Each structure stands twice: as structure tokens, then as C-alpha cells.
Image: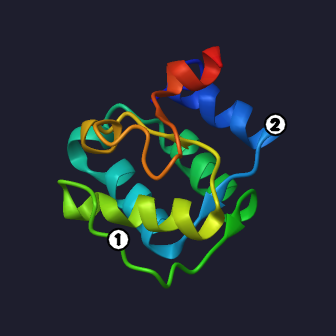
């Protein structure tokens, strides 16, 4: 990920124009993914720290209580649970297992480029 890439630009736009929802489970997953050796070499440590800081301080935190089992990848259900409790209007993801659910319970699931185009 780089500061000029589509995912970062979508994140930056969402921070300035929309409400970002976060849960502890999702934050922990994002943190772990960004630190995976295979990805860590492509993500500048300063950018990773900036992103995590923005997720900590620039989001509205929720504590999902309703469990969901709609995704073919059970590890991705945490994103759906967060969207449900946050009453999300859109889910932005590049994950194929989530994109396959579009729309989920009336919530569009779009790629970062689709979010930027919308």
C-alpha cells in the first residue's frame, strides 16, 4: 500500500467525507495483516503507523453483539457484524468473499475504486 494508491485514496476520502466504523476485532485484523512479512515489505513503516493511528483516532468505535455467519470465509464475518451494528451505508473492500455478497442485507459492498467513482 502506498499513499497514492487507490485503497489509500479511498480511505482518505472516507475519512473526510463519511463516517468510518471500527471494532477491536477489525482493528486487530488490519494490524496483523499490515505486519505480515509478505505485505510488510511493501508497506512503509511510517505509513503503517499513520494508518493505524488514523484507525484508532479517526473512527467511530462499535462493539458488535450480534453474530453473523453469512460469509463463506468465517473470518470475514467480523466486517459484516461491524457494518450491521454501525448501520453502514456501504462496505468498501477488496476481499472476494465479501464482494461476493454484494449487496448484503441492502448494504452495497464495493471495491475501493468503485467507492471513489461513486
User: Most extreme residue toward the top, as rendered?
Assistant: 117
Q: Give the total of numbered labels.
A: 2
Whether residue 31 appears in this view of the structure is no
- Quadrant of image for the N terminus: top left
What crowding class fits label 1: few (fewer than 14 Cα within 10 Å), some (14-19), or many (20 or more)? some
Badge 2, how many Cα within 10 Å: few under 14, some, many 20+?
A: few
Q: Earlier in the sequence, mark 2 or mark 1?
A: 2
Q: Looking at this view, is 31 or 81 the one in front?
A: 81
Residue 24 position in % (x across, y down):
51, 74
Residue drawn at the location 26% of the way across and 51% of the way down: 36
Q: Which residue is at a point 64% across and 65% down the rendered structure image?
A: 86
Q: In screen coordinates, is 42 left or right of 75?
A: right
Per the rendering, the mark at residue 68 is: 1
In the drawing, does residue 65 fall left or right of residue 3? left
User: Which residue lies at the image location 58% right of the left edge and 55% below the top edge?
Assistant: 52
Residue 23 point in image, percent of width and height: 54, 70
The quadrant of the image that shows the C terminus is: top right
Using the image, determine if residue 49 lies above or below residue 109. Answer: below
State the scheme by which the image is colored: rainbow
Question: Which residue is label 2 attached to?
Answer: 17
Task: Pinpoint residue 3: horizontal percent, then vertical percent.
Answer: 59, 26
Between residue 51 and residue 116, name the one nearer to us.
Answer: 116
Compared with residue 110, is residue 82 higher up or lower down, i.e. above or below? Answer: below
Dot 2 falls on a residue whose secondary structure is: helix
Q: Quadrant of residue 103?
A: top left
Q: Is residue 68 left or right of residue 61?
A: left
Amino acid at each position: 500500500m502506498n499513499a497514492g494508491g487507490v485503497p489509500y485514496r479511498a480511505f482518505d476520502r472516507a475519512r473526510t467525507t463519511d463516517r468510518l466504523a471500527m471494532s477491536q476485532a477489525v482493528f486487530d485484523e488490519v494490524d496483523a495483516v499490515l505486519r505480515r512479512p509478505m505485505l510488510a515489505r511493501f508497506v512503509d513503516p511510517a505509513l503503517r503507523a499513520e494508518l493505524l493511528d488514523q484507525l484508532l483516532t479517526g473512527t467511530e468505535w462499535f462493539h458488535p453483539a450480534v453474530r453473523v455467519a453469512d460469509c463463506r470465509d468465517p473470518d470475514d464475518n467480523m466486517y459484516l457484524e461491524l457494518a450491521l451494528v454501525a448501520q453502514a451505508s456501504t462496505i468498501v473492500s477488496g476481499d472476494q468473499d465479501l464482494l461476493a455478497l454484494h449487496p448484503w442485507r441492502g448494504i452495497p459492498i464495493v471495491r475501493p475504486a468503485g467507492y471513489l467513482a461513486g
